[in-house]
Amino acid sequence: MAITEKTTDSLKADRGTLALQGFITAIANPKGWAFMISLLPPFIRTDYSLVPQLVTLLSIILVIELFCMIVYASGGKTLRSFLDKSGNVRLLNRIAGTLMAGVGIWLAFW
């Protein structure tokens, strides 16, 4: 049986699929939940009903996560358009190399 190569057109997904995949990835991230939950106890009051407090805090967490994912995706889109232009990858490599050499020199003399 021959294996055929897929073209880039057949690998493209629609925006809804990508958004759903990003959402599932974000809510399934245990590190993100552990960080957010570590912030919760000071805001929970025992003299009030627990369910509305948790719904409010969960809503805040989801809104913050959505905002962070939008910023992350926008940065990736911008970086992709930046790196598509010729010469920008070489410039980025030179900047990264210079920074690494700077860190090496700093560590050598520290």
Image: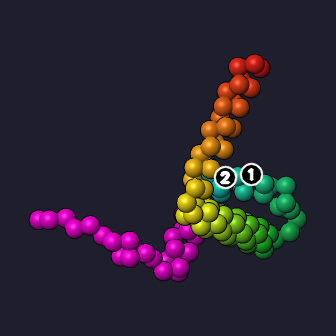
In the rendering, which numbered label is found on residue 38?
Answer: 1
Q: Position of residue 105 (x, y in %)?
A: 71, 25
Q: Is residue 54 visible?
A: no
| Residues in magenta, as a range | 1-25
Q: Is 89 on the left-hand or right-hand side of 63? A: left
The residue drawn where x is 86% and y is 69% is 48
Q: Residue furthest top?
A: 109
- Quarter placement of the C terminus: top right
Q: CA distance from mark 1 to mark 2?
A: 6 Å
Are the residues tagged 1 and 2 within 8 Å (C-beta)? yes
Q: Position of residue 22 (x, y in %)?
A: 56, 68
**Alpha-carbon neighbours of circle 2 within 10 Å: few (<14), some, or many (≥20)?**
few
In the rendering, which numbered label is found on residue 34?
Answer: 2
Residue type of the residue flagged with mark 2:
Ala
Q: Position of residue 97 (x, y in %)?
A: 62, 38
Q: Check the image and report above or below for 65 versus 109.
A: below
